[in-house]
Each structure stands twice: as C-alpha cells, then as structure tokens.
C-alpha cells in the first residue's frame, strides 16, 4: 500500500465543481488583483477568525514581515521566538533588520515556554513571536501577560493553526497581529502561495494594506511599499475551502485520536493536546531516539512520513546573520526534539485502511 503525506489531488477532486466554477467566475470578471473575490474572502476570513481585519498578502512569510513593518519593528530591536519552526519565522525578523532571540520550548507541546521568556528580555526587546506549532496554540494568556508587563508587542505565527483555539482565548485575541499562510500544504491551502495578516488594530490593518500594494493608500498615491498582494484567483479558491475548514479540522482530530490510540503503548512520544485547547493537527508528530530507523521503515513500506523540523534554526547553515555571538546559543529541549521528530501522514481525506496501515507498520517493526 502507498500512503501519501498530502492529499492535495483528493481534496481537489472532492471540490472540483465548486473550485472550477469559482475560478471561472474570476476569469470571466476581468478583475484579478485587489478585486471583489479578494474583498469577499478577507471579510469571510475576518468573520471566521473573529477578528476585525484580514488583509490578504502574497505568502505567510510576507504576512509576518509586513506585520513587523506595520508595528515599527526594525533595526536594533530584539524579537523573542523559538527555533523549532520553519525558517521563514526568523527570516521575517531578519528582513526588518531585527535580531531573533530564542527561548526553549515546553517538553510536552513543543511550543514556546512562557517561563523562559522573561530571562530573555533586554532593553532592546520589542516583541514576542509565539509559533502555534503543529496546529496547537501556544500558551497565549501567559505570553500576553508577560508582554503587557514589559510593554512588548506580540505577533502570532499561525501558519499551522488556522481554526485552532485555546481554552480561554481565540487565536489573535491577545496579540497585536497574526500572520498566517495559505500555501498548498496548510490546513487551508490554495494552489500556490498566499497568506494573510489578521488584526484587531485599525492602524496595523491600514498600514499592511498600503505596504502590500507599493505603499499606496489610494490610486496613484504612493509612499514606500512592496508588491505582496493575494490575487483574486487564490482568494476565490480559499473562499470555497474556508466553508469546509471546521469539518476538515474535526477530521484531523479524529485521525490524530486513531493514531494515538494505536500507538500509545509503543514507547514513542506522542503529541500532547493541552486540556481545553482545540488542536487542529496540521502535523501529527511523534518523537523517538530511533528516528532514522523508524523513518526508513515507514518509507520502505510506502508510507510517506517526513521530518519537521529536524534542524533547529540556530543550528542552520544560514544562522546567524551578522550576530556571531548567537552561534553559542543552547536550547537543549529544542535540540532534543529536532533530533527525534517524525511526521506521520495527516490530511482529512486519509482512509481508515491507510491509517491502520501506518499504525500496523510501526507496531510490526517494534514487534508489538
């Protein structure tokens, strides 16, 4: 049996008439950039997210980058974040000229550990960027309280967790801005790259709208900006998919429960969902010191398991940029996790037979 990691084509086939019709409608409209399909999706996304503003941009990377610019984060500033995330989280900090400062993670959720934040704050600290890793929100009440006490900005990296929620908060409720991604691999993904900035701050939304369109607040009026617009074709596709997002998230949670039930006595470290949180399982990540062996067994059995993120950012060849002292940073929990992660196939269209095959392959190799 072959078990793919992503189900892009299956999902497209399940929605083909609606997606094809949405694309056709945009093509016939003649309005492809900053047109009505984008306006409609932004309104739908803001309503879904219970946020005041949603601003469509070119990618999740640009969403973070433009949010940082809109909030005035720049050269000389320090931004606290984590190192077990996709490289773009830190690239966006570097893009604005700021310096990333890493803190270690909680051993159970692998999200930012709030207990480690205050020791990393200096007179140069401007913001905290928690990453909602694998689909589970970070402990935002604790992070937001630390930020409030120290007068810091908070920007949430929600590229993996759209539709997730905490027990006492919604994503975005406790921060200045949220950056999210709609590239094809995400829980809500279009057929290419796309992203959005979500915020309850009028000033941030206004600034990002200008920045994404050559600094233009009105036609033929320009300050300084960039070309980072979410086009109407992608927006129309995302509108179709957004209506299914909660059902897809529920299915991901069902699949995660099946994996957990089938693997709970294997000795593997399985994902931990914080009590009361809505984890949407962008990834189902297990950990084992025998990572390379397990990964090889799965791949040889036709199961397209992968690793996310096996090299922590502070250990990447591209780090550090202009900050040699950072080469000595030590993040033992982050490094331990990075060396042991395996992501099992996870998408809503997975069949029970495929799920059982993954579980049975792991158990057979472990002779359980």
Image: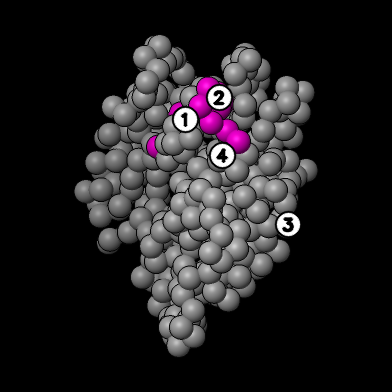
Q: Earlier in the sequence, mark 1 or mark 2?
A: 2
Q: Earlier in the sequence, mark 1 or mark 3?
A: 3
C-alpha span from label 1 to label 3: 28 Å
Residue located 78% across and 43% down the image: 168
Q: Quadrant of residue 276?
A: top right
C-alpha span from label 3 to label 2: 28 Å
Residue 313 image label = none
Label 4: which secondary element? helix
Residue located 77% across and 23% down the image: 149
Residue 68 image label = 4
Residue located 65% across and 52% down the image: 205
Label 1: which secondary element? loop
Q: Position of residue 46 (x, y in %)?
A: 67, 61
Q: Which residue is mark 3?
A: 52
For the record, the magenta segment spans 72-87
Label 2: which secondary element? loop
Nearer to us in this view, 234 or 264: 234
Q: Earlier in the sequence, mark 3 or mark 4?
A: 3
Q: Mark 3 or mark 2, which is nearer to you?
A: 2
Nearer to us in this view, 99 or 268: 99
Residue at the extreme bottom of the image, as rendered: 28
The reply to whether discs 1 and 3 touch (Cβ–Cβ < 8 Å) is no
C-alpha span from label 4 to label 2: 11 Å
Give the side of residue 266 with respect to residue 196, left or right.
Answer: left
Q: Earlier in the sequence, mark 4 or mark 2?
A: 4
**138 is within the stretch colored magenta:** no
The reply to whether discs 1 and 4 touch (Cβ–Cβ < 8 Å) is no
Q: Which residue is mark 1?
A: 97
Task: Name the chief secondary structure element in magenta.
Answer: loop
Q: Which residue is mark 2?
A: 77
């Amino acid at each position: 049996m072959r078990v793919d990691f992503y189900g892009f084509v299956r999902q497209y086939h399940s929605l083909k008439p609606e997606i094809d019709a949405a694309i056709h409608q945009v093509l016939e409209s003649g309005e492809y950039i900053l047109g009505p399909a984008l306006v409609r999706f932004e309104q739908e996304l803001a309503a879904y997210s219970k946020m005041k503003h949603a601003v469509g941009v070119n990618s999740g990377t640009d969403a973070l980058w433009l949010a940082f610019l809109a909030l005035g984060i720049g050269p000389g500033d320090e931004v606290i974040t984590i190192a077990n995330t996709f490289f773009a989280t830190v690239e966006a900090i570097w893009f604005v000229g700021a310096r990333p400062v890493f803190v270690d993670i909680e051993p159970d959720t692998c999200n930012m550990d709030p207990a480690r934040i205050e020791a990393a704050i200096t007179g140069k600290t401007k913001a905290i960027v928690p990453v909602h890793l694998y689909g589970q929100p970070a402990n935002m009440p604790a992070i937001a309280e630390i930020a409030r006490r120290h007068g810091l900005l908070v920007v949430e990296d929600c590229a993996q967790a759209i539709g997730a929620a905490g027990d006492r908060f919604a994503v975005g409720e406790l921060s200045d801005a949220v950056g999210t991604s709609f590239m094809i691999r995400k829980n809500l993904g279009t057929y290419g790259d796309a992203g959005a900035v979500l915020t309850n701050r009028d000033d941030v939304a206004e600034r990002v709208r200008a920045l994404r369109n050559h600094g233009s607040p009105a036609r033929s009026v320009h300050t300084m900006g960039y070309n980072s617009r979410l086009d109407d074709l992608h927006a129309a596709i995302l509108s179709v998919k957004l209506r299914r997002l909660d059902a897809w998230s529920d299915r991901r949670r069902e699949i995660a429960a099946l994996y957990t039930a089938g693997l709970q006595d294997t000795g593997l470290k399985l994902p931990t969902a914080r009590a009361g949180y809505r984890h949407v399982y962008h990834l189902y990540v297990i950990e084992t010191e025998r990572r390379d062996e397990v990964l090889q067994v799965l791949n040889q059995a036709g199961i397209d398991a992968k690793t996310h993120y096996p090299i922590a950012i502070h250990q990447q060849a591209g780090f550090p940029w202009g900050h040699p002292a950072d080469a000595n940073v030590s993040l033992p929990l982050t490094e331990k996790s990075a060396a042991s992660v395996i992501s099992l196939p996870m998408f809503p269209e997975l069949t029970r037979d495929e799920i059982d095959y993954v579980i049975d392959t792991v158990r057979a190799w472990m002779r359980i």
